[in-house]
Amino acid sequence: MAERENRRDRRDRDEAPEFADRLVAINRVSKTVKGGKRFGFAALVVVGDQKGRVGFGKGKAKEVPEAIRKATEQAKRQMIRVPLKEGRTLHHDIEGRHGAGRVVMRTAPHGTGIIAGGPMRAVFEMLGIHDVVAKSTGSQNPYNMIRATLNGLGREASPRQVAQRRGKKVADILPKRDDAAAETADA
């Protein structure tokens, strides 16, 4: 009995980080049968903790709420962690691809906001990014746009990760402050 309660407590603790979710698309499909048409629904949901974790999921069911529930559960299982610069933007410009979908995401100065359309905006909001400029070229399919966005975000690296991979210090990786000031003064 105590073991069952411990499992339940552990499960509650694992789900303790509150996730926000955003419904991106619902697709109604119909199947023609002898008695008429049977409708089914497919839902696309993006889930995130707005602190650097995001995931997406798809769910199909005969009813819309059930499809959304399935999609949300799948999204929570497939979350990725993305390093954020100052907790508000990307560390560097990145490009993501999936199929015919191609997205370009650029870091932006404070106060820019989220300049992105449709499904990409939902991903950035659930991720917790406040300043980003993004453009989607190619496929307008929301599934491919989200996959391309997550493909690019999955390849983003923070200076700490790059330094660790190269066996250097973060200070060696980042440009010096006086060098950057001198370069802008010369220009």
Image (cartoon, rainbow, N blue to C red):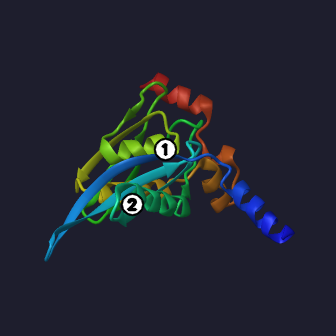
What residue did someone put label 2 on?
Answer: 67
Q: CA distance from mark 2 to mark 1?
A: 20 Å
Question: Which label was assigned to residue 15?
Answer: none
Residue occupying image coordinates x 81% and y 64%: 6
- In the image, 152 versus 55, the foreground residue is 55
Q: Sequence order check: which comes first, mark 2 or mark 1?
A: 2
Q: Position of residue 36 (x, y in %)?
A: 14, 69
14 vs 88: above or below: below
144 vs 122: above or below: below
Q: Residue furthest front?
A: 35
Tell whether 141 sits left or right of 182: left
- In the image, 158 versus 154, the foreground residue is 154
Can residue 110 be seen here?
yes
Q: Position of residue 123 (x, y in %)?
A: 43, 47
Tell me how many marks there are: 2
60 vs 176: above or below: below
Quadrant hosting residue 102:
bottom left
Q: Position of residue 71 (x, y in %)?
A: 43, 60
Residue occupying image coordinates x 28% and y 48%: 136
Amino acid under disc 2:
Ala
Mark 2 lies on a secondary structure that is helix
What residue did someone put label 1 on?
Answer: 126
Can residue 93 be seen here?
no
